[in-house]
Image (spheres, rainbow, N blue to C red):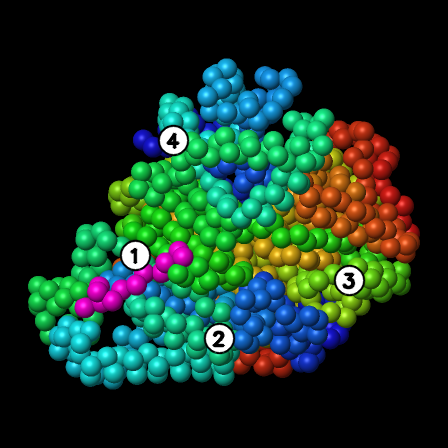
Amino acid sequence: MTVSSLSPSDSNSCLRAPRPLRASERRRVETLRSAPLRRSRTARIMRGSARSHGTQERDKCVCMTNCPTLIVTVGLPARGKTYISKKLTRYLNWIGVPTKEFNVGQYRRDCVKIYKSFEFFRPDNEEGLKIRKQCASAALNDVQQYLGEEGGQVAVFDATNTTRERRETIVRFAEQNGYKVFFVESVCEDPDVIAENIVQVKLGSPDYTDCNTDEAIEDFMKRIKCYENSYQTLDEDLDRELSFIKIIDVGRRYLVNRVLDHIQSRIVYYLMNIHITPRSIYLCRHGESDLNVKGRIGGDSGLSLRGKEFARYLAKFIQDQNIKDLKVWTSQMKRTIQTAEALSVPYEQWKALNEIDAGVCEEMMYEEIQENYPLEFALRDQDKYRYRYPKGESYEDLVQRLEPVIMELERQENVLVICHQAVMRCLLAYFLDKSADELPYLKCPLHTVLKLTPVAYGCKVESISLNVDAVNTHRDKPENVNIHRSSEDALQTVPPHL
Amino acid sequence: MCYLFLIANIPFSDFFSLSSVPQFTNSPTLIVMVGLPARGKTYISKKLTRYLNWIGVPTKVFNLGQYRREAVQAYKTFEFFLPDNEEAMKIRKACAITALKDIHHYFTQEQGQVAVFDATNTTRDRRADILCFAKESGYKVFFVESICDDPDIIEANIMEVKLSSPDYQDCDKEEALVDFLKRIECYKMSYVPLDDEMDRNLSYIKIFNVGFRYLVNRVQDHIQSRIVYYLMNIHVTPRSIYLCRHGESELNLLGRIGGDSGLSPRGNKFACTLAGFIQSQCIRNLKVWTSHMKRTIQTAEALGVAYEQWKALNEIDAGVCEELTYEEIQEHYPEEFALRDQDKYRYRYPKGESYEDLVHRLEPVIMELERQENVLVVCHQAVMRCLLAYFLDKSAEELPYLKCPLHTVLKLTPVAYGCKVESVFLNVEAVNTHRDRPVNVDVSRDPQDALLTVPEHI
């Protein structure tokens, strides 16, 4: 396992032209450059001791520290299982852990085309039970495929899983395949919360497209009843060997049992930080800066005249919105701080919100990058998410440094984040579940505020342009990303500037 | 307006602080330990305090046993702790009040942000008194209860930390053990654990059997969330952490800082010697971590085992001073050079980082080190200083001057309430890269004064 160069640049002197990485080196660089969570790649070529100490109890299948994890939700209907599944999946994918959810309700809808009534879920409905069991099996098969051939690392099995028997089946399935199992149970008896859940997500479900609201609620309540009698909650004693977190009353209390490894610890931390209190997150960039106007990237310049105007407009906009207890966050760069200053409210500076470090390309125009580093410029267009500027950062690095910001955003309520183009793309990708391929090309124009409001299983986005002109700083992916392309082809999508 | 309230409560310097650490909480937090003796309360208190201070949250432990030892000069027997010993009860209550007064002083006069009240606090009455005290001053309260019924763990605790306590200086081991177990019995009768129902409005974490299970109730804010996360990641399984720097690099030889050069011939020799050392130690399931920089990777390669790269372990970014010698820094940036000597911990290189930034980026590494067992971390000088400061509880003033010479492995083994350190020099010569703080840190000093402590190089 030899790697002779790990960064695209020759780092003995920043004055020499960088040596291009050979294709073979680049592939090896990918495998070795791992964030602590994405260990699966290196594990498969491990030469050292492969046994993880955490599996002494269950040596059915050698489970290395990074064997796939099967998250299993548990709980009555309308307890937020799907909400948690989707949110957790979105978070894990964003931090680079390939995750997919498998919603058994979906499988049921695919199997039984038309939902008639709650009677399908009655415990004595044998036909119904058969179908539901088949759906669960089909879902588990797909889980196996995802965690096996498709290279997934975490699968979220989203179903009620309310009986000990069903859970034991799943645990056996996991043991046979060498997966670690982590249960996430949501327990809630607050009738208001449950009613709100039903209104927010069940009424809009395909199951109830042809019903009116009252009928739907009544039917759904009866559906819940069908599960209640056979519901066996995870028990401190009977289930003491299992790894799980029990979330009680939407996060008022948690019971955490036998966390086995890093990913489970992260999952627990995440679940303990999310909440469902209504709130909005406002994302915007700093006002137009002097370097923006010149078409130069990075740097730490102040606001242009138009940028200052935007800051004043932003202050008024924020006032008009009448936001309760708004927190304002900026980076540690002049342009975001100057923007926040105009708001005349306290704000907090995060170094983690600083713009992506463009390394040797800092303060250059795209034309200059093409002239001085044509190879780098092309490599970046080939894989904008993973490409790291020589002596700088990649979008992938950005995501890693923004993770604490996201965690804190989850804890907070109303927040306005004044940041930068690449940073805003990363944050937006988290909230809107955008892939690593889409992320670096998300449109985040200057002088535009995005208001994100969590709703149902996702996020509502309102885009508000504050009517102050600014340069466009968005460079689309050009057609020709070949390293031998002409300058013209390379610079085709560069936005105009002074 | 809410922001006026904020200004009144945060010290001016923090409010407009340019540090990378966001304000964790506005009101001080009182962490209250709960549990029978020998349940690890002091272990948790000290460890948590060390962690919070390292990440920049001023924290202090107030150990009631200490107050009691000061009040009652000579400990006689467990009888002091009998529930019907009125004289003793008076003294113990007075000690608690004194401790709370000191906590109040710490918060109001000493800019403390978190206080850990380390005592048994096993009765509902005592906890109610504390809650009252906190409410009066607007302090947030977070309880940490440790419940353990495994007699082996309890006995191991007693052996490790109680027998060597000042209380048992003049006893032999057997006597001490017997007395201590009777002491525990004194508390058992009146012990009322935090209750799911009756204490449902309190914020707390209950730790069962050293981390097997946790019950977390009503986490109020960011700092409590971080505390919970930390407590859920620590363990007491015996293990060792090995810290070392990469082998001597080519830039090291030239006296240049930063950069991303490869190993020198002596550095390569060190890597091979390190491999031999590691093998000879016969370490179970050793994990090896490096940074993303050539010199640590080349060092790890020689070990012939799998290793994991962390970008967070990269050396401090010296910004405009990258790859310069100290002489060149003095020549081109004499003012910066002096400012750095004035406050090496907080000073940030132009377009670079500070030690304070480093600590912030190393926090996930520390968290993962806590989760792991045997680990070898091959890193860099400034990084190693930060990690060492965490394990050895060094202050921000000491941290940037900790000695971390090349070709030396530090083996850290947690023991009792702290860490045993063994320093192993692997007998391969290397340049010295340690620059002490010079006497003259004035911005208008002579180059000579500035360069007084620069170590030799080619």
Label 2: few (<14), some (14–19) or many (≥20) C-alpha neighbours in 10 Å? some
Q: Quadrant of residue A36?
A: bottom right
Label 3 vs label 1: CA separation?
Answer: 47 Å
Circle on res. B54:
none
Circle on res. A175:
2
Kindly identify the residue that appears in the image at 55 percent across and 31 percent down. Answer: B183
Q: Which residues are magenta?
A: A226-237
Q: Secondary structure at mark 3?
A: loop
Circle on res. B124:
4
* Pointers 2 and 1 within a single chain: yes
Q: Secondary structure at mark 4?
A: helix
Q: Secondary structure at mark 2?
A: helix
Circle on res. A187:
1
* Pointers 3 and 4 within a single chain: yes
Label 1: few (<14), some (14–19) or many (≥20) C-alpha neighbours in 10 Å? many
Depth check, mark 1 against mark 4: the one in front is: 4
Kindly identify the residue that appears in the image at 77 percent across and 70 percent down. Answer: B304
Circle on res. B282:
3
Q: Is residue A461 left or right of residue A63?
A: left
Depth check, mark 3 against mark 4: the one in front is: 4
Kindly identify the residue that appears in the image at 48 percent across and 32 percent down. Answer: B187
Label 4 vs label 2: CA separation?
Answer: 45 Å
Residue A467 spot, x, y in % from top left? 32, 53
The reply to whether callout 3 and callout 2 are in contact (CB within 8 Å) is no
The reply to whether callout 3 and callout 1 are in contact (CB within 8 Å) is no
Label 3 vs label 4: CA separation?
Answer: 49 Å
Residue B181 spot, x, y in % from top left? 57, 35
